[in-house]
Amino acid sequence: MWESIQYVTSGLTLAAFIAAAIAWVSKSKIEERERLINSADSDKRADLVKSALEFFDVDIAGLTKDDRYKVVIAQIHARSRRNGTVAIVVCFLALLLAGVSVYAISEARKPTSSTATAIGKERRFVSTATSPLSLSNTTEWHYPEDTVRLSGVIATNGNALNIRARRLIAEDATLQGLAQSAEKGAAGRAGTLGATGTGVGQAGASGENGAEGAIGARGAPHGSIQLEVDEMTGSLAILSSGQTGGSGGTGGQGGNGGGGAKGEASRPGLIDCASGPGHGGRGGDGGNGGRGGDGADGGAAGDVRLKVVKSFAGSVFVTAKGGVGGAAGQGGAAGAPGAGGAEGDARGRCNPAGRQGASGAAGSRGSVGQPGAAGAHGRIAVDLPSVSTTVIGEFRYQNN
């Protein structure tokens, strides 16, 4: 029985083993009692028989010594057989429970994937219109023993992404980089209007030039993307281009020129006009439009590393181009010229003389800013079972 202890693998088998041990020890004690009675002297045997009968709780009234001895021996044999049977049955149950435990443990350690090539769990990263998947920081999906399934458009938002898995299944999956352009520069402040002439025949003031537009925001760079798997199937697009630079702000509009003041009134004489009406003041010049802001540089593309160790079936498209530079800001609109002042009033015998003040000159439109430069292209390192290469900017491969 003691050899059965090697099969104790759980709490149930341990309990069964303890019960069997107790039954076996009890059987041994009873058999030891029989040996003591049989080997005892005749004068001591009576006491041993009496003690055994008390242990077995047997009524011995009216029995001779020989009958008492026979009853004790019969009780000992019956109890020994029962305890032996119990020990054997319990040991059998312990062995059975041990077998069940070993089987359950072996089943629990088997792969749970439904495919022969994918060991472990399946990790699903699925993005839909109603439930989009968007990364907010650097992300690592490390599942060396599992299958990773990608589906739909997963927005990286320029964050670095590192995927390690035993198997990659791409269901028309796209790792989408920075889709929106960087912020456009603010428009320049418009020039203030020229003041209107206030004194008699005074010229209007020129409008203020518009301010230059602000430079756009620089395009954000894309983080690196790394994929290392044993097997890959399906269609995957990786877009790790840098962000487009922000456009320059529009230049501020030039201020309009101020209007000229009205001319001096005429002075009538006794019999004719002593002095005709005065000239109106000249209108102020319009302000020039501000220069357009410069476009910002595009962001650098993220490097991409794709490694498939054992098998590849499907297609992959990678673009890692630098972000386009921001567009140049347009120049501000020219300020309008101020109107000339009216001639003075004609009084008495004085007649109008057509002395309207001249209009000011129009301002000029602001010049256009400079476009931003494109960002640097990324390095694409590819290591597939059938192709190994390094390219800059873009890579496309299909193997069905």
Image (cartoon, helix red, strand yellow):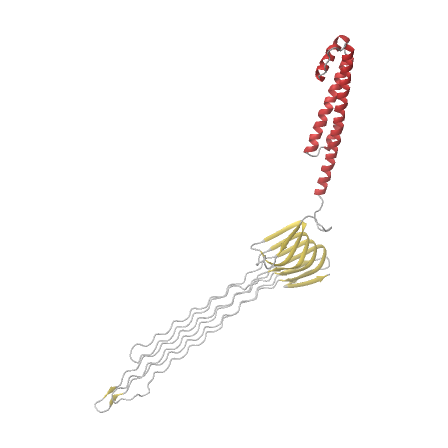
Q: Answer with the quarter of the image where residue 78 lies.
A: top right
Residue 226 versus residue 69 in the image, above or below? below
Is 378 on the left or on the right of 184, as rendered? right
Q: Is residue 170 above or below residue 347?
A: above
Q: How far from the left and from the top, in percent, is residue 178?
A: 57, 61
Quadrant of the image containing the N terminus? top right
| Outermost residue toward the left in this view | 270
The location of residue 40, given as percent across then percent down, is 76, 11
Query: Is residue 121 placed above or below 287 in the rendered structure?
Result: above
Q: In this view of the protein, which residue sits in the foreground, 63 or 183?
A: 63
* Closer-to-camera residue (81/60): 60
In the image, farthest residue toward the bottom:
271
- List the single residue furthest toward the front: 62
Point 74% across, 16% down: residue: 33
Residue 75, position as x, y percentages in the image = 76, 18
Give the vertical position of 281 relative to 139 (above or below). Answer: below
All told, the count of numbered labels is: 0
Q: Position of residue 388 (x, y in %)?
A: 70, 59
Q: Quadrant of the C terminus?
A: bottom right
Q: Dividing the picture into quarters, in which one does residue 231 lie?
A: bottom right
In terms of image quadrants, where is residue 127? bottom right
